[in-house]
Amino acid sequence: MEETWRGFACRHLVFEEQEAVVVCPKQEKANGFLAVKTEYWDAFPEAVELPLLEEGFHLCYIRNENRWGTDADLDRKARFLRWVQKEWGLQEKCVLVGMSCGGLIAMKLAARYPELVRCLYLDAPVVNYMSCPCGFGIGEPLGEDLTEILDALGMESVSELLAYRDMPLDHIGELVEQRIPVVMVAGDSDRTVPYCENGILVEKAYRNAGVEIEVFIEPGKDHHPHGMRKPERAAAFIKRQFE
């Protein structure tokens, strides 16, 4: 029996001991483009994944060992993307779809492997660890997430994290230098990943450098649900980058 996901044919597999999935668009619409969900598979797919599948994009995901963009996960993901592109005959560059911690993974992956990335979709992205999960600003401190990130990075205290120089914000300059377009969505009432401490850092750097960025701030929206009222606008931005 053919596997399906949200009405689209898919293939579940294991790549380098990690669970993965590739979803195919309707054959008559297939355009050779690839979208990559970087974290939280099957969460809020209506935000942009389903619209992109409807437009003819393939979609894939591989499970991470953690949510904090460590080198082993990023390198495995890059190898997986190259394999998917070759196996399905897709274009070399893709769009990374990053929500929350998936946003930080997308930013770090694009900085590390810019040759694989056409553009980024960032949705309430974690950019500044001092904001999330530490909660040093206006956001809520996330105790369990703080323990999780320290474990993932092999640290024993927040003081070590204060000196960490591999946060997503440390890679914004590389994204700007590579001129990787960004479409970003966020809520103006996000108490978990406040835009004024996270996404705004990307927006300011991009606008100052004259690199293409489109930002949609949703009024009254908290961290969840991800996405926007008119997801087709984000999908149109992404599709334009592949034309």
Image: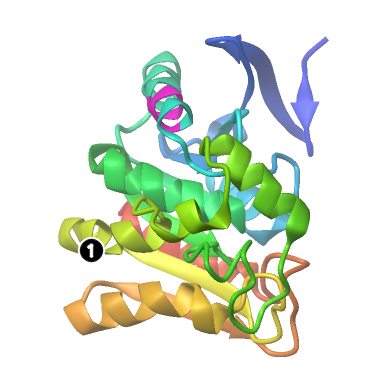
**Could you tell me residue 86's position as x and y percent?**
36, 17
Task: Name the residue nearer the viewer: 119 or 223.
Answer: 223
Residue 172 vs 27, above or below: the answer is below
Q: Residues within 10 Å of mark 1 (few under 14, many from 20)?
A: some
Q: Is residue 131 left or right of residue 182?
A: right
Which region is colored magenta?
Answer: 74-78
Q: In what quadrant of the picture does the N terminus appear?
A: top right
Residue 75 vs 141, above or below: the answer is above
By secondary structure, the bulk of the magenta-drawn segment is best described as helix
**Could you tell me residue 146's position as x and y percent?**
66, 53
**Whether residue 203 can be seen here:** yes
Three-letter residue code for mark 1: Gly
Q: Is residue 122 left or right of residue 61?
A: left
Residue placed at 38% from the left, 21% from the top? 79
Q: How is the image coloured?
A: rainbow
Quadrant of residue 68 within the rendered picture? top right
The residue beneath circle 1 is 173
Residue 237 vs 74, above or below: the answer is below
**Whether residue 57 can be seen here:** no
- Residue 18 magenta-drawn? no
| Mark 1 element type | helix
Residue placed at 57% from the left, 29% from the top? 27
Residue placed at 44% from the left, 80% from the top? 200
Q: In what quadrant of the picture does the C terminus appear?
A: bottom left
Counting the numbered discs, the total is: 1
Outermost residue toward the right in this view = 1
